[in-house]
Structure formats: structure tokens, C-alpha cells
Image (tube, grey):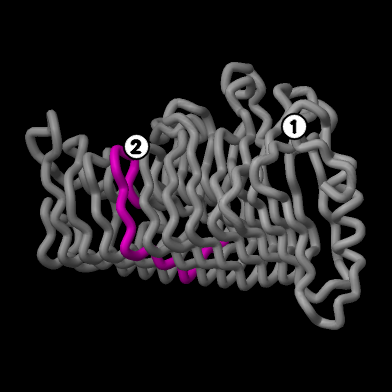
């Protein structure tokens, strides 16, 4: 407010935020954290903004108590912009509070625009902490974390209607040592998506649903060499989701997805609870055409202590590439029972290898 913001939700406050950022980024606080306060009880209309570093301040805290709202228009994306609010090259950034970030995405969902845009994007922000906020109705994905390391995301609430297209909760790419903790995510697409170049990702205590579950990939689009490793999902609940926990890759590509675990997962009427799909296509259907040479190598994947109900009979789906296949797939203590309007559950396998003990339904392809 000291920089001229009105906070009435009607007048564009972007310039006030730019001025405030310039001062806080250039502040020399002798190693202390400098703080920018966005007060409660105010609503700030913002056009697309880039908060650029590097900054002189050793650490920056943005305390969000009010509400940030996006323009009711898709026109800004026609100008080559793909992010509403972006932080770039800012280390030790703490964004917290009990405020809201509202993308007002309904106008996007009703349009024919296919462009991928993010409400909140962090690029090359090491030591990032994001806590306590509510994220609503993004035009497409809510939060993107790219080229970052040592990130902690906790106690978030992310919400969009289940029919809203491509409204992922959190997308992670080219990042390492990222923790997603104790958050509630209910959207129209993946609750969390771990994409290429990511490693040492821990997702713990997330409640997901509705949405498309927790996904690794898709990987290998356009024949790319993609890698993901050391992803660990634990103590999560998936309710009324289109998928449960899944790994999806295109054909005709290369790379690996390895050292992955899904542990202590609770399912409540989740469709497709466990999926490995190496025949992924953009439209989400399995390939029925000519097999393409090459695939992401999937190995060392463990599913343990997964229980609950499935909304369809195909509870475990391991469709691995005909040539590369999937190695060292371990399943133990799996108990997935039929849910509402689902008379039974069963497993589908193709070229998957590993071990299975105490699983319901049985997984005969894993000896």
C-alpha cells in the first residue's frame, strides 16, 4: 500500500507491485530477511508480472494476507506471455501467509485457447519456501517449479472445478530436492506432476481429489531424452480421482524413470489406481498404431501398503513397452477392492517384470 496500490480489486495495481519489488530486491539488509507485506482485507488486480532477480537481499519474505486476482481476459497470453505471476532467479524466497491467489480461470476454460499457461511460476529459485496460501481457479496449471533446488511447499490449498481443463495443481520440472507436504489439492488435472529433469522429489501427506492423481510424466514427448529419479510419494490420499498413482511415457523416446516409490497410499473410489503406461498419447488413449522404436526405461519402482477402493474393475494396469519393458517392479501389501458400481478388480500386464506379495487383485506377471 505504501507504493500506491489501491487494493480495491478494480484498479490495476501492477505498477505498485513492480515498485515495491524493485526496492525489496535491491535492499541491503546486512544478511537479514527483508519483508514485503500484502495486507489482509485487500484485493489486488494484477496484470502479468515478472519479479526478476538476482537480488541484493540475502532472503526475501513476501507475506500475503490479501487476495491477488488475475484479469478477466485471455488477451495477455496472445502477447507471448505464458505466466501470470513469475519469480525468476530469486534465491531464498519465502512466500507465505493465509491469503489467496485467484487466477479467475473460467474465461479460459470456456475458450478454445490451447496454450499452456501458469498462474504462478518459479524459475531458478533455489531455497524457495511456499506455505499456507490458497490457490484458486488457475487458467491452466496453478503452480510451476522449474530449474529450482531445495524447495519446500507445505500447507497449501489448491482448488479448481473437476471439469476445468489442464488445471494441474503443482508441476515440477528440471528441479531437485523438492518437498511437497501436507497440502490439499482438488483440480481438473494432475494434483502433482513430476516432469523431465526432476530428482529427489518427496510428496508426503497430500490429499488429492478430484483430479487426475499424482503423476510422473508424461515423459519423452517428441522423441526427447528425459530422466526422472528418486521420487517418493508417501502417506497420501486420493479421493474420486481419474487416476491414482501413475507413470506415463511416450513411445519413440529415450531416458529413464527409476528409483520411485509409492508408500502408504489410501484410495477412495479412485479410477485406475495404479498405472504404468508406456504407450501414452496426447489424447490420453493407448496407442493402437504402429509401435515406435525406443522408450523410457522404467525400473526400480516400489508400491507398498496401498489400500482402498477402485471406481473401475481394472485396478492395476502395467502396460510396458514391448521391447524395453519395465524392470524390478515391486508390489507388496496391496489391497484394492471394488468400489461403487464395480463388481470386481483385476490386473492388466504387458512386459512388466518384478515381484508381488500379498496383493489384491493378484498381479500374475510379477513372479
Q: Which residue is mark 1?
A: 8
Q: Is residue 291 left or right of residue 10?
A: left
- What kind of element bears circle 2? loop
Give residue 41's quadrant in the image.
top right
Residue in view at x 74 percent, y 56 percent: 37
Residue 50 coordinates in the image, percent (x, y): 82, 48
Q: Position of residue 262 (x, y in %)?
A: 33, 63
Instruction: Say above or below: 221 vs 286.
Output: below
Pick the residue in front: 52 or 343: 52
Q: Residue at x 62, y 65 (%)?
A: 129
* Residue at the image position 56 percent from the left and 52 percent from the top: 98
Q: Is residue 22 visible?
A: yes
Residue 243 part of the magenta segment: yes
Secondary element type, mark 1 = strand
- Is residue 293 at all visible to an observer of this figure? no
The quadrant where residue 90 appears: bottom right
Residue drawn at x 79%, y 69% is 34
Q: Residues within 10 Å of mark 2 (few under 14, many from 20)?
A: many
Image location of residue 233, percent across then percent down: 38, 63
In the rendered structure, the answer to whether residue 299 lies left or right of residue 73 reads left
Q: In which quadrant of the rendered image does the C terminus lie?
A: bottom left
Q: CA distance from mark 1 to mark 2?
A: 39 Å
- Report the magenta stretch's main SS: strand
Viewer-closest of 222 and 132: 132
- Label 1 or label 2, whichever comes before in sequence order: 1
For marks 1 and 2, give the one nearer the viewer.
1
Disc 1 crowd rating (10 Å Cα; few below 14, some 14-19, many 20+) is few
Query: In the image, which residues are magenta?
Result: 227-245
Residue 100 bears which disc, if any? none
Q: Is residue 298 left or right of residue 240?
A: right
For label 2, the residue is 242
Residue 91 placement (x, y as % from top left): 75, 69
Amino acid at each position: 500500500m505504501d507504493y500506491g496500490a489501491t487494493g480495491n480489486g478494480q484498479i490495476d495495481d501492477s505498477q505498485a507491485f513492480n515498485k515495491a519489488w524493485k526496492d525489496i530486491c535491491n535492499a541491503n539488509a546486512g544478511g537479514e530477511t527483508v519483508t514485503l507485506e500484502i495486507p489482509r482485507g485487500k484485493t489486488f488486480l494484477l496484470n502479468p508480472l515478472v519479479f526478476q532477480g538476482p537480488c541484493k537481499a540475502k532472503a526475501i519474505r513476501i507475506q500475503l494476507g490479501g487476495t491477488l486476482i488475475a484479469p478477466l481476459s485471455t488477451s495477455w497470453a496472445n502477447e507471448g506471455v505464458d505466466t501470470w505471476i513469475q519469480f525468476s532467479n530469486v534465491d531464498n524466497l519465502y512466500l507465505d501467509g493465509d491469503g489467496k491467489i485467484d487466477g479467475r480461470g473460467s474465461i479460459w476454460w470456456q475458450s478454445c485457447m490451447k496454450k499452456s499457461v501458469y498462474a504462478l511460476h518459479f524459475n531458478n529459485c533455489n531455497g524457495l519456501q511456499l506455505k499456507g496460501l490458497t490457490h484458486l481457479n488457475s487458467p491452466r496449471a496453478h503452480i510451476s517449479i522449474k530449474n529450482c533446488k531445495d524447495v519446500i511447499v507445505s500447507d497449501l490449498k489448491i482448488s479448481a472445478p473437476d471439469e476445468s481443463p489442464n488445471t494441474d495443481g503443482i508441476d515440477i520440472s528440471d528441479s531437485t530436492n523438492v518437498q511437497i507436504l501436507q497440502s490439499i489439492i482438488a483440480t481438473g488435472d494432475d494434483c502433482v506432476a513430476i516432469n523431465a529433469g526432476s530428482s529427489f522429489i518427496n510428496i508426503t501427506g497430500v490429499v488429492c481429489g478430484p483430479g487426475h492423481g499424482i503423476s510422473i510424466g508424461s515423459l519423452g514427448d517428441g522423441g526427447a531424452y528425459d530422466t526422472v529419479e528418486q521420487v517418493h510419494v508417501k502417506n497420501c490420499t486420493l479421493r474420486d480421482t481419474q487416476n491414482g498413482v501413475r507413470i506415463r511415457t511416450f513411445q519413440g523416446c529415450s531416458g529413464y524413470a527409476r528409483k520411485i516409490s509409492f508408500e502408504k497410499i489410501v484410495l477412495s473410489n479412485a479410477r485406475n489406481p495404479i498405472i504404468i503406461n508406456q504407450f501414452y498419447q496426447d489424447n490420453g488413449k493407448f496407442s493402437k498404431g504402429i509401435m515406435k522404436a525406443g522408450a523410457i526405461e522404467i525400473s526400480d519402482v516400489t508400491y507398498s501398503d496401498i489400500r482402498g477402493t477402485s471406481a473401475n474393475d481394472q485396478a492395476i494396469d502395467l502396460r510396458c513397452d514391448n521391447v524395453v519393458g519395465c524392470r524390478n517392479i515391486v508390489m507388496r501389501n496391496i489391497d484394492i477392492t471394488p468400489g461403487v458400481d464395480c463388481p470386481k478388480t483385476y490386473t492388466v500386464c504387458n512386459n512388466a517384470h518384478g515381484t508381488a506379495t500379498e496383493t489384491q487383485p493378484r498381479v500374475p506377471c510379477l513372479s
